[in-house]
Image (cartoon, helix red, strand yellow):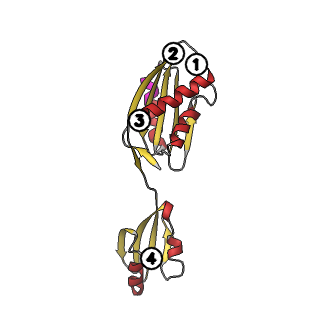
Amino acid sequence: MFQIKENVSNEMIIKNSRFICLLYNIDNIDSINLVLAKIRKDNKDATHVCYAYRLENTQKYSDDGEPGGTAGAPIMDVLEKNNITNVLAVVVRYFGGIKLGAGGLIRAYRQSVINCLKLTDLEEIVFYNYYELISRYDDLKLLNTLTKNLTIIKKDFKDKIIYKVQVEKDNDNIEILLKDCKIEIKKIC
């Protein structure tokens, strides 16, 4: 998965209609709603404010009054084909008096996002699972051996030893790694 490095915007004119694309690096629904409210407020005279967003576990798009499937879906298509997440893509349209037809709208919204993406770099993002590994003091050597290739976030030495570790979701084999040993494993998130 990738995310945009910086927020960018771009404008294009097609048959007198202005298409203003805005891309935001964003990571939660509340932020998305705030950004959309601000864009709508700043563009009160816009005919349409169409968007698509992708987060790790959810995605959504809106045609905002354009014919079904002619705005939000093409915006989402560009995000999906480029494997981009943690992004809000908004295209504000000011109607210029000439109808574009369904095919023309699809091409305009898609191209608006494609052009805007060219203005920023993409960076690969990695998603993690987090675990607590719980061990007796007698098994400390085993715990250290099993975790030598893991990212240990925190170590607690109380009545038992607790290591908090992070594991890339795409390479998460920790339960297999610890299957037949004395180390207790609890997934945190």
Q: What residue type is labelled 2?
A: Lys
Which mark is drawn over residue 100?
Answer: 1
Please tell me which residue lies in front, 81 or 130: 81
Residue 129, above or below 87? below
Q: Residues within 10 Å of mark 1 (few under 14, many from 20)?
A: some
* Tag 4 residue: 134
Q: Are marks 3 and 2 in contact (CB under 8 Å)?
A: no
* Tag 2 residue: 15
**Magenta region: which residues?**
38-44
Residue visible at 49% across and 83% down in the picture: 182
Where is residue 21, by image quadrant? top left
Q: Do the residues labelled 2 and 1 touch (CB within 8 Å)?
A: yes
Q: What element carries label 2?
A: loop
Question: How far from the left and from the top, in percent, is residue 50?
Answer: 53, 29
Residue 17 on the magenta segment: no
User: How far separated are the C-alphas under marks 2 and 1?
Assistant: 8 Å
Relative placement, left or right, of 157 versus 43 is left
Q: Residues within 10 Å of mark 2 (few under 14, many from 20)?
A: few
Where is residue 120, by image quadrant? top left
Q: Which amino acid does label 4 sit on?
A: Ile
Q: Earlier in the sequence, mark 1 or mark 3?
A: 1
